[in-house]
Image (spheres, rainbow, N blue to C red):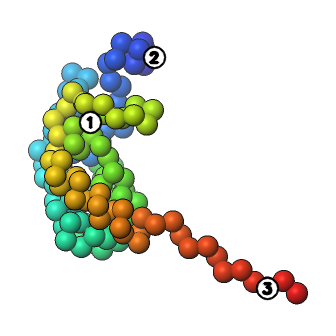
Amino acid sequence: MNQNSRAKGIPFYEYVTYGYRVENRKLVIDDERAEHVRWVFAPFLEIGSCTELARKVGARGIRTPRGNRIDKKYLYRMLNNRAYIGEAVHKGDSYPGEHAAIIDRETWDKVHVILQESPESAPPAPAPTRPRC
């Protein structure tokens, strides 16, 4: 059934993006969680660190839909999830989605300028080499 649905362009949601829920096979905004998503983007603009943001999210008691704590890896994925600007991604290509955006494009762009400059997003430094004897 999933293959036929995908072939017809009907979305299939195995995992629903935080801030949305599925109704009649379409993503709709979950108001309470969407406020959490907006809150995540706003302080990131000020602090620019997923590590520090994870501490703040934990202090607010925000959890994943499964009840787990939100760590910096989860936040990094949130900040890079194009669904929040109303887009759908399929095989690496982005398309206008049928769902409403939670984050405006201006905020998205500002966050991504920070992510590109952030040392957290840079690849890890190579391990020091030891001289061979």
Query: Percent x, y for residue 123?
Result: 51, 65
The residue sitting at 21% across, 37% down in the picture is 86
Q: Residue furthest right?
A: 133
The residue sitting at 45% across, 17% down in the picture is 3
Disc 2 residue crowd, few under 14, some 14–19, many 20+, Cα 10 Å: few
Which numbered disc, 3 or 2, marks the residue that appears first in the sequence?
Answer: 2
Look at mark 1 in the image and give the residue it sits on: 87
Question: Quick check: 43 left or right of 14?
Answer: left
Label of residue 23 in the image? none
Look at mark 2 in the image and give the residue it sits on: 3
Instruction: Quarter of the image for the N terminus: give it.
Output: top left
Label 3, label 2: how far apart the Cα atoms are: 55 Å
Query: Percent x, y for residue 128?
Result: 66, 80
Name the amino acid type tagged 1: Glu
The residue sitting at 31% across, 38% down in the picture is 16
Residue 84 occupies which quadrant of the picture? top left
Relative to 22, residue 7 above or below: above
Look at mark 3 in the image and give the residue it sits on: 131
Which numbered disc, 2 or 1, marks the residue that appears first in the sequence?
Answer: 2
Visible residue check, residue 60: no
Instruction: Quarter of the image for the C terminus: give it.
Output: bottom right
